[in-house]
Amino acid sequence: MTEFIPAAKPLIGDDERAAVDRVLQSGMVAQGPEVAAFEKEFSEHFVQGLPVVAVNSGTSGLHLGLLAAGVGPGDEVIVPSFTFAATANAVALTGATPVFADIEPDTFTLDPSAVESAITERTRGILPVHLYGHPARMDELGEIARARGLALFEDAAQAHGAALDGRPVGTFGAMTMFSLYPTKNMTSGEGGMVVAPEEDAARRVRLLRNQGMERQYENEVIGFNARMTDIHAAIGRVQLTKVEAWTESRRANAAFLDSHLAGVIVPPVADGARHVYHQYTIRVQEDRDGFVSALKEEYSIGSGVYYPIPNHRLPSLQRYAPGLDLPETERAAREAVSLPVHPSLSSEDLERIVEAVNALAGAGS
């Protein structure tokens, strides 16, 4: 029987297990020295030493980061609809209104012209997503934000190490979130990182994650329990030593697919962008769902459809966008398929993926 190739495969080995065991033996498993060390190392590795705060999930990171930036009731934040719902959820959880704007067809990220059209007198900020590991157009979005007096944020959940013109994602916005969920390019088991360039904002995130305290029993604000444990941080610290090699494997796998796939639209990379291929997302213009099913059933290859229902049509979020028309978002939701690109793929796996995709694309043409 042909071995199944999964769409994603978390890499957790002996080093991570040893790190967890070390923390368990120490007797200090809640937020402590491992978290502090992880924050420092993550900051130096990805965001040029900017203040970083570890939290228990990427969604918590978005939520607390927006709260720390002052986003709340009466405000609007412009977000893409073609992404995971956590982005808009985090805006809504602050009491603000997520306003959905369309994406560019090439990068699957926020279209600056659509953002410009979505701005109102209530707009507080713009929150692009560096989707699939490709950076959004931060130069143009930054110009819009500066011209209109708006805050620029970043959802970098899928974009560890992505960059634009040599500048890493996470260094453009007034707040950035990185996710550390198991299927991301690196993981802590579960968790998130909030980048807050202004130390005052970073301190507010630290307060909000810990019941409003920096010092025990001296609660300054009403906060949450959104702390990362030392167990999770220990896993993340080990992964941090491996993520660059994994990223280069992803990029090499993507380059192989780029040069060998036919009959589908492979993911373009914008000038000056460093794509880290959290997902390798193609477009299948005819019968995408049949293509996905055949890939699994006939060739034993997994894939992912991210995201089949745009956020503005989800039952939980559609009240924020009655009657909204986002044509590029809808087209992407019909056509996008993410193929395996993870570092565990062998050369034989890659050849199987190419053979299968080309056969199915040829049969459907």
Image: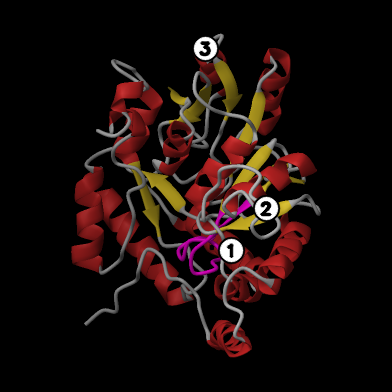
Discs 1/2, front: 2
Q: Where is residue 361 in the image (x, y as percent from the top left)?
A: 29, 49
Tell me, for residue 252, which label it has, or none.
1
The residue positioned 52% from the left and 70% from the top of the image is 343
Contact (Cβ within 8 Å) of mark 1 with mark 2: no
Q: Count up the numbered dots.
A: 3
Q: Position of residue 145 (x, y in %)?
A: 67, 21
Does residue 189 appear to the left or right of 46 in the view shown? left
Rounded to the nearest angstrom, the CA distance separating label 2 from label 3 is 45 Å
The amino acid type found where label 1 is placed reads Ala
What is the magenta range?
179-194
The residue positioned 56% from the left and 34% from the top of the image is 128
Tell me, for residue 218, which label it has, or none.
2
The amino acid type found where label 3 is placed reads Ser
Coloration mode: secondary structure
Tell me, for residue 117, which label it has, or none.
3
Q: What element carries label 3?
A: helix
Q: Where is residue 299 in the image (x, y as percent from the top left)?
A: 25, 67
The residue positioned 51% from the left and 43% from the top of the image is 131
Task: Depth check: give the residue in front, 206 or 350.
Answer: 206
Outermost residue, top direction? 121
Does residue 206 appear to the left or right of 277 in the view shown? right
Rounded to the nearest angstrom, the CA distance separating label 3 from label 1 is 38 Å
